[in-house]
Image (cartoon, rainbow, N blue to C red):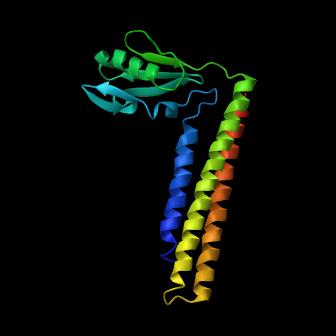
C-alpha cells in the first residue's frame, strides 16, 4: 500500500475502534463488564479504572459482581458507580458489590437501537471526512511533480478504503442492534 494512504487508513481504523468501544459500553439487557470501562474510582486520591481496584465477574446473565481487593474501597466503588451514567444502583453485602441489570422494555430496546444507528452514522461521517481530507491532500500533490494517473490511483485506493470501513461500521451496528433486540 502507498505510504501516502497510511495516515488516512490509520484515522479510519481509529474511528472504527472508537465506535467499537463506544458500542461495547451500551448495555443490552445482559450484564456486560464493559459498561464499567469508563468508571474511575478514587483510590488514595488517584482516579483509577474500576478494573484495577477489584475483580469483576458476571455470575449470572444480568448480574455484574465486583470484589474489591481492599474492603475499604467498597464505599468509593459504590460512589463512583452512582456518579456514572450506568443507571444502576449498586448493592453491597460488605464484601461484594452487585449490579443487577433490569430486563429492558421493548421501547427502551428500540431507543437503544436508534442510538446505536445514530452513532454508526456519525462514525461514517467521520470516515467520509477523512476521505475528503485525503482527496484534498492528493489534489495538492498535482502542483508538485506527481502525475494525474498517480493521483487518480491514490483517490481510487482511498475510496476502496472508505468503502471497506463503511462496510465494517455497518456490520458493527447491525450486530449490536441484533444483540439489543434479542430478548
Nearest to the observer: residue 90 or residue 108: 108
**Residue at the far left in the pictured view:** 44
Left or right, residue 180 beside residue 129: right
Which picture quadrant has residue 163? bottom right
Q: Is residue 182 visible?
A: no
Task: Tell me what residue is drawn at x 36 percent, y 16 percent.
Answer: 74
Question: As rendered, which of 172 and 19 lies closer to the eye?
Answer: 19
Residue 115 drawn at (x, y percent): 66, 37
Q: Position of residue 3 (x, y in %)?
A: 47, 76
Q: Position of residue 139 (x, y in %)?
A: 56, 78
Q: Is residue 64 left or right of residue 125?
A: left
Q: Residue at x 54, y 41 (%)?
A: 22
Residue nearer the viewer, 172 or 149? 149
Q: Residue furthest top?
A: 93
Left or right, residue 7 beside residue 47:
right
Q: Name above or below for residue 62 compared with residue 165.
A: above
Residue 19 higher or lower than 98, as above or below: below
- Is residue 137 something one can see in this rendering? yes
Q: Give the answer, above or below, for where 131 lies relative to 89.
A: below
Which residue is pictured at 52% across the width and 72% down the height? 5
At a point 47% along the width and 21% down the height, the residue shown is: 65
Give the total of numbered labels.
0
- At which x and y percent is residue 23? 58, 40
The image quadrant where one finds the C terminus is: top right
Amino acid at each position: 500500500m502507498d505510504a501516502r494512504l497510511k495516515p488516512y487508513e490509520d484515522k479510519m481504523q481509529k474511528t472504527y475502534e472508537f465506535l467499537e468501544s463506544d458500542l461495547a459500553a451500551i448495555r443490552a439487557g445482559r450484564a456486560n463488564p464493559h459498561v464499567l470501562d469508563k468508571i474511575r474510582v478514587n483510590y488514595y486520591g488517584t482516579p483509577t479504572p474500576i478494573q484495577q481496584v477489584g475483580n469483576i465477574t458476571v455470575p449470572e446473565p444480568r448480574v455484574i459482581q465486583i470484589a474489591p481487593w481492599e474492603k475499604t474501597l467498597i464505599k468509593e466503588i459504590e460512589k463512583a458507580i452512582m456518579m456514572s451514567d450506568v443507571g444502576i444502583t449498586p448493592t453491597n453485602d460488605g464484601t461484594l458489590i452487585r449490579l443487577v441489570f433490569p430486563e429492558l422494555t421493548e421501547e427502551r430496546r428500540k431507543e437503544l437501537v436508534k442510538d446505536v444507528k445514530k452513532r454508526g452514522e456519525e462514525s461514517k461521517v467521520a470516515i467520509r471526512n477523512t476521505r475528503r481530507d485525503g482527496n484534498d491532500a492528493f489534489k495538492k500533490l498535482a502542483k508538485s511533480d506527481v502525475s494525474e494517473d498517480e493521483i487518480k490511483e491514490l483517490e481510487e485506493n482511498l475510496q476502496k478504503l472508505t468503502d471497506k470501513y463503511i462496510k465494517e461500521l455497518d456490520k458493527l451496528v447491525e450486530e449490536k442492534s441484533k444483540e439489543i433486540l434479542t430478548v
